[in-house]
Each structure stands twice: as C-alpha cells, then as structure tokens.
Image (cartoon, helix red, strand yellow):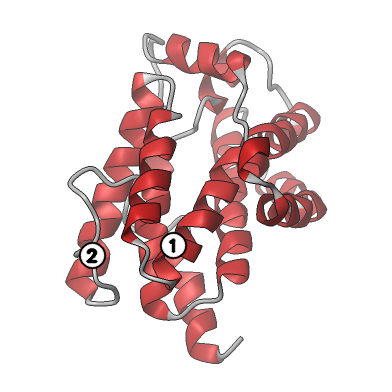
Amino acid sequence: MNAAALLHLLQFASPALPIGGYSYSQGLEAAIEQGLVTDASSARAWIADYLQHVMATWDAPLLWRLMEAFSCADQDAVALWSERFIASRDTFELRAESIQMGYSLVRLIAELGVADVAMLGDEVALPTAFACAVAGLGIAPADALLAWLFGWAENQVLVCVKSIPLGQVAGQRLLLSLCPDLEQAAALARSLADEDLSNWAPGLSMLSMQHEVQHGRLYRS
C-alpha cells in the first residue's frame, strides 16, 4: 500500500470525519440503558456479537460489493446494493442514520473533489458514499473494508467509554482485544455468497425501536 493511499484511508475511515458518526450508538445506548452492557466484559460481548451477526454477514459484504461495483463503474450494481442496504435498515433511526451520514459524506467528497458522485442517486446510504470515495482515492478495497470495520468498532468503544462509563485505558484494551475479531469479520465478508447474506438480529431491532422513545438519550440511534 503506497503512502498516499494509506493517508487517504486513515482520513476517510476515521470516526473524526465530519459526517456525524459520533452522534450514533447503533443500539448500544439502549443496551446500556437496559443493563445489558455494564462493564468491559459485557461491552466486548456486545460489540463482538454485533460484529459477527450483523457487520460481518451483511453491512461489510454489501460494502465489499459496492466497492467492486464502483471499481468497474457498474451503475446497476451500485443501485442494487444501495437499495438493499437501505431496505435492510429496519427501524426509523437506523435508516435515518445511514442516509444522513451518506448525505454528509457525499457532500464532503464532492467539495473536496476526491471522487465523482455523478452515479449516485438522491438518497445515498453511507456504505455507498464510502465505496465511492474508496474508488476515487484509489484505495485497495480489502484495506478499506478492514478500516471500515475498525472505525465502526472504535466508535462503539467510544460510546462505552463515555456512557458506561469505561476508563480510557480500558477502552483501548477493549479495542485491542477486538483486532482478531475484526480480521475474521473482514475475511468472512469477502467470502460470503449472495444467498448467505443475513442481518437477522431481532433483539437489536427491538432495542433500536425502544431507543427511539428513550428519554435522556445522548445518541441519535
């Protein structure tokens, strides 16, 4: 990986990217509120399960397909997998999260001039916008996929640090312990056939619905 591609990857996979990622917990705040996540051990179990049962088997494989579609300028495939990703957001707040962050990232990459957003539709999911940026910046899809997963895990850990709360060292220890899980998730995401994709997680969907009416929440999802 050349230096320019690495630097671009570090920038666009960072939770510090100004697209609002810090505003979302993806159901984790509701799990903390209900006492399902209370310490470092239960936080790791939550993140690892989410990674295994949702990210590795749905979100990441769809991102992988979107990156492949952009690499060969296959507009039909971009539209297909974007539509399926949006349709898979089974609560209002999870759908709004992806659309809002996708919109913000599209605006950012357009203003920075790093990618052509002409083949994107009016309603753009976050993975679609990220895949567009990856293609425009010449980042290897395998590297981008792993960085995407790491950025997601880092944001989950930051929610735990702020909301359980965990100490900063405990948070970094937790993130470090997840590295093997992230590698396995990336490998699985690249290998799954279309018919093996799944994001079946009814408990997460219920927590997200409950979070939409939760009082005193810090996060938008």
Q: Is residue 209 left or right of residue 96?
A: right
Residue labelled with disc 1: 69
Q: Which mark is residue 212?
A: none
Label 2: how many residues lie within 10 Å, few (<14), some (14-19) or many (20+)? some
Q: Nearer the viewer, residue 74 or 167?
A: 74
Q: Quadrant of residue 216?
A: top left
As helix, strand or loop, the secondary structure at mark 1 comes to: helix
Q: Quadrant of residue 137?
A: bottom left
Name the amino acid type tagged 1.
Ala
Q: Nearer the viewer, residue 77 or 153?
A: 77
Identify which residue is drawn at 39% across, 29% down: 87
| Residue 214 % position (x, y) | 41, 10
| Residue 158 % position (x, y) | 56, 43
Identify which residue is drawn at 30% across, 57% down: 105
Indicate the quadrant containing the N terminus: top left, top right, bottom left or bottom right: bottom right
Residue labelled with disc 2: 117
Q: Nearer the viewer, residue 220 or 73?
A: 73
Question: Where 3 sits versus 212, above or below?
Answer: below
